[in-house]
Amino acid sequence: MTSFAEAIRTFHSDSQSRDAFYAGIDSALAANRVPRATLFAILDEEHAATPLPHDVYAAVKRRIENTPHPDPLDTSDETRVQTTPSGGSSRQSASQGAFGNGQVVAELDQVKGVGDTLNARFVLEECLGVGGMGTVYKALDLRKLEASDRRPYVAIKVLNLQFRGNPKSLIALQREARKAQTLAHRNIVTVYDFDRDGSVVYLTMEYLSGQPLSRMLRNPNFKGMPFSEAFPIFKGMANALAYAHERGFVHCDFKPANVFLTDTAEVKVIDFGIARVFQRPEEETEATIFDPGSLGALTPAYASPEMLEHLEPDPRDDVYALGCITYELLTGKHPFDRVPALQARSANMKPARPDDLGNKQWRALKAALSFDREARTLTVAQFLDELSEERPATSTGSKGLPAKALIGGAAIVAAILAAAGYYFYDQSKSNEEAPKETDVAGTVIAPATAPTPPAQQAAPPSAPAVVAAPAAPPALTLDAVNPVLAGVPCSALVASVHDRTVDVQGFVSEQYGTTRLKQVLAAVPGASTVNLGVTQVADSKCDVLKVFGPYWSANHQTGRPASLRTRAAGAKLTEGQPLILDVMTPGYDSYVNVDYFQLDGTVVHLVPNERAKDNQAPPHYTATIGTMGDWVVGAPFGSELVVLVTTPAPLFDTLRPGSEPKADYLRAVESRMTQLAGKYGRDHVAVDIVQISTQARKK
């Protein structure tokens, strides 16, 4: 994967000919057996950093398209499309090879690229982008050219091989065209028609000159923009979605790649390809025949929790995606570091407030980003209205006074405070030194009454009239919190701080307990509020936390590039229930290991095992294991740990036995993880942990 990126960079760094450059690209593609979508993502990232000439960019795109590697399920950074043979399930259990290479694309399938012509009419001249459903090209319409049309170009979306391998793909495209044709709005791309040329299925739409919003957001130099510049883009997106919602359509895959910024400063929303009707008219019988959402095209970083849980679509799903994109426009960062909503919700992740955003606007943005559909902003129109309220100006006060007037007023206030003598200073100091108390939730509260100041507080006659201002409380920093967490025995903890609040997630032993943890954190200089999302584990699990805890903490500090989640509500399972787990891998090729530490002192290896030996996964891969009832809850019952470990190389050279003593495995895995961390870097060994609670079935 790295050599492919380096091969692209040689175009700018070397004086080689284009033939030599293309030879290097072909060599890199032959050596890198990774998904095409991953290669497309690398190319787009390099192109965003240092643009390639259009013809060179298109030539490399075409070479990727023609690469004869069997693709795993598409795992692009933007959209993942999970496809299975007709009648199959898009979810795989571990026994079916959830981490295998997936569906192999037949090499005999026809491929079209730059320079080819569709139906002797549309000449594909330039590759504009790649999405989950297909590749978009700039195409010359020969019919328009013959008619001397001054705008002879159209955009054509050609379905990719994996997508059109689905027998329902033609139906999907036909319905996309029909739906998009009904959405006639200045902020929605105009769709003309759909057709096919042999096995190649394509859609024609208006050609736009500009760039997708994703290219701007992914530029390494983009650090966000002022509200005044971001708002017109937000307004264009919001108007398009509100218009579609009024006509009964939810986009369902709204993301930066589906927003186009034209050279004339227009905002166009594209690709209603998987939009599903949420208000089906009684006469719409076709809606029961095919649901494009069944193709599984979603973008995890922008999909709401409800979309990831496959619930019925709702306009509030698009509100969540719009909130994520708006946050990126303002800050240059995804509100949850591109962690899928389900994992972000489990980790209790909270977005930091963007700079220079008014209170009402911040509340509006937070409501749009709510993980709970019922708490989320009801409509896009409401979000637009709330976010567009006038913000307080930064250079004037609440009365509209100039900044200089405010400074003068502040000086007057300072003089008045100084005239009050030492009383206020000493009382504030006493308040600082008063012991802190905590409520039942662990939040630090101020003393009920302030200590009575000494009787004689006046300054001596010879003292100057002006005294020093009260000392500011110390700032709360992670550097002050982390050593405290490191000193907690039998734990795996990670903290974040904001203002004077410290949030801590992770695991701690029952013997140490959360009450004591709150007390030590409340004593950290600068801390006034302590929020805990910490799970208590039995002391018998300290050996597991000792081995995996440091890697778990590092994984969470970097935004959880690897995650593990159980499908059971509250992680509680009853005897006879299947253990079903959702896994997401980090942003590099990795080997997946999932282990179940049982109460009887043994560990069961869920992945890999004799039935599923292939545990290699591409970057940002998602899989569900256990759906076929591979593991069913039984005695003994209590709290148990399931651990995910992802590594850049196989954890072990050979399969370990299906189950083995915990102590033996921990010694082996600790030694091997240390080796891999030393060779590839500690950040390439990622761990996530889930504690489940099991109980007997009620008689």
Image (tube, helix red, strand yellow):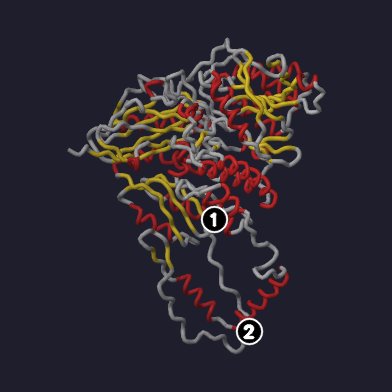
The image shows residue 593 at horizontal and vertical percentages of 41, 28
**Amino acid at the residue labelled 1:** Arg
Disc assigned to residue 363: 1
As displayed, is residue 254 above or below residue 589? below
The image shows residue 362 at horizontal and vertical percentages of 57, 55
Answer with left or right where residue 372 lies relative to residue 6: left
As displayed, is residue 283 above or below residue 549? above
Q: Is mark 1 on a helix, strand or loop?
A: helix
**Amino acid at the residue labelled 2:** Ala
As displayed, is residue 599 above or below residue 25? below
Q: How many marks?
A: 2
The image shows residue 99 at horizontal and vertical percentages of 45, 24
Query: Split into 4 quadrants, where in the image is the N terminus?
Result: top right
In the image, farthest residue toward the top: 108
Among the 4 quarters of the image, the one containing residue 146? top right
Q: For label 1, count other residues whose C-alpha is less than 10 Å away and answer few (under 14), some (14-19) or many (20+).
A: some
Answer with left or right where residue 680 lies relative to residue 268: left
In the image, 692 versus 119, the foreground residue is 119
- The residue positioned 36% from the left and 19% from the top of the image is 611
In the image, 485 versus 156, the foreground residue is 156
Of the two numbered discs 2 and 1 in the rendering, the one whose residue sits closer to the viewer = 1
Residue on which the image places disc 2 = 465
